[in-house]
Image (tube, rainbow, N blue to C red):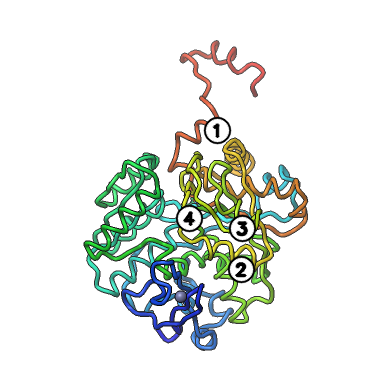
Amino acid sequence: MKNVLGLRCIECKKEVPSEAGTYTCPSCGSKGGIMDVIYDYQEINRMTTREQVTNSKDNSIFRYLPFLPIHPESARPHLRVGWSPLYKPQGLGKSLGMSNLYIKDDGQNPTASLKDRASIIAVIRAVEEKAPTVAASSTGNAASSLAGSAAAMGIKSVIFVPSRAPQGKIAQLLIFGATVISVQGSYEDTFRLSAEAIDRFGWYNRNAAINPYLVEGKKTVALEIAEQLNWEVPDWVILSVGDGCTIAGVWKGFMDLYSAGWIDRLPKIAGVQSTGCCPLVDAFLEDRPWTPKEENTIADSIAVGVPRNPDKALNAVRESGGTMVAVSDEAILDAMRELGRTSGIFGEPAGVTGTAGLKVLLEKGIIGADEKVVSIVTGNGLKDVQNAIKAVGEPIKVEPSLKELLVKLEGKI
Ligand SMILES: *Cc1c(COP(=O)(O)O)cnc(C)c1O
Ligand SMILES: [Zn+2]
């Protein structure tokens, strides 16, 4: 990989080579020592150009291969990950009073969430490192996407999920042939047990914060947003936050494009959590270190009381001049309804939390009605039908009789 210079610790700034088995900073050790992948931008510009990428017929994240930490000739799963649509939904724009609103629908990935962008990199690297088994703990989507990518590459996956994970996600795991461990405890308990087991068995570790290569997969959502907007950077990108890897990836993507000279400015990044679990929003707004929180929200994918990538996430928001906000579960269900009804886009609760937050930031005047805003829908609503029904209620029940239908429909259409 001539494009990758190595890994740099986000705390002590130490640089180490990118080698199999090195994930965290050897100097910072147990304190965390989360790393960033660093690139040779001149080399990237020798390997490709903006025009070459724009003309690429590869409708997946691999159109950006020179920006990724994998060997160009490595085996890749056949799944089409990335290149999800960037819509400008008129209905939602009107409903929110915005003239320049875009939705990046990342529910349209092979396993229906943005996590596929990270998992496919994990599996490619696991095969590069000759690991027969990949493992992860997850609130659900990282798990189902890892299992999907592993199935596509013919390697085994072992997945730890908290007992509260929605059934749709569990079904995906089992369909993809994963060994599924349902931990009777919180996400924190789940993460801890998976880390112990990964240590004990020597599996390839997909846990996103620890593994710096996964954020590199997630950053492709930013590369796509920039390209889909003709390399004209939006004013804001807004999305939900759990562990913090996704928001960190979005920022890394824009920073890489900026460093390579492909864009000439950077967006502000806004991160949204549920009021039922918002350790990072509280830390940001009160300008203090984060503290653990209970996991008390319907948005299971971001119910993360002990975030695993807090520093990268907070750095992304601060460096970009962005902000953070928390929204109630009711506001999340409202956003789910509004997106569906005005635009035909169906997101899971954590998938629409960014859009719920956008509404609040508009009302507060932090985001302007005419600013160019991209709200990322991070996961598809079919993963969690139970909460969707909560948002919209039951259908109209009738006997098979036109007479009864006419009565029931009166005043309704
Ligand atoms: C994982 C996930 C997030 C949050 O990503 P983090 O890296 O944990 O911050 C948001 N939405 C969905 C649908 C997810 O699966
Ligand atoms: Zn360090």
Q: Nearer the viewer, mark 1 or mark 4?
A: 4
Upstream in sequence: badge 1 or badge 4: 4
Q: Which residue is mark 2?
A: 226
- Residue annotated with mark 4: 307
The image quarter in which residue 19 lies: bottom left
Closer mark to the observer between disc 3 and disc 2: 3
| Label 1, residues with CA under 10 Å away: few <14, some 14-19, many ≥20 | some
Q: Quadrant of residue 156?
A: bottom left
- Mark 3, Cα crowd under 10 Å, few <14 / some 14-19 / many 20+, is few
Label 4 – label 3 distance at C-alpha: 15 Å
Q: Position of residue 294 (x, y in %)?
A: 48, 43
Respond yes or no on whether mark 4 lies under 8 Å from ligand 1.
yes
Q: Residue at x 45, y 67 (%)?
A: 217
Disc assigned to residue 391: 1
Q: Which SS class for mark 3?
A: loop
Look at label 4 and name its amino acid.
Pro
The residue that disc 3 covers is 288
Quadrant where the N terminus lies? bottom left
Q: Nearer the viewer, mark 2 or mark 4?
A: 4
Q: Position of residue 228 (x, y in %)?
A: 60, 65
Residue 142 is labelled as none
Mark toward the start of the polypeptide (4 vs 3): 3
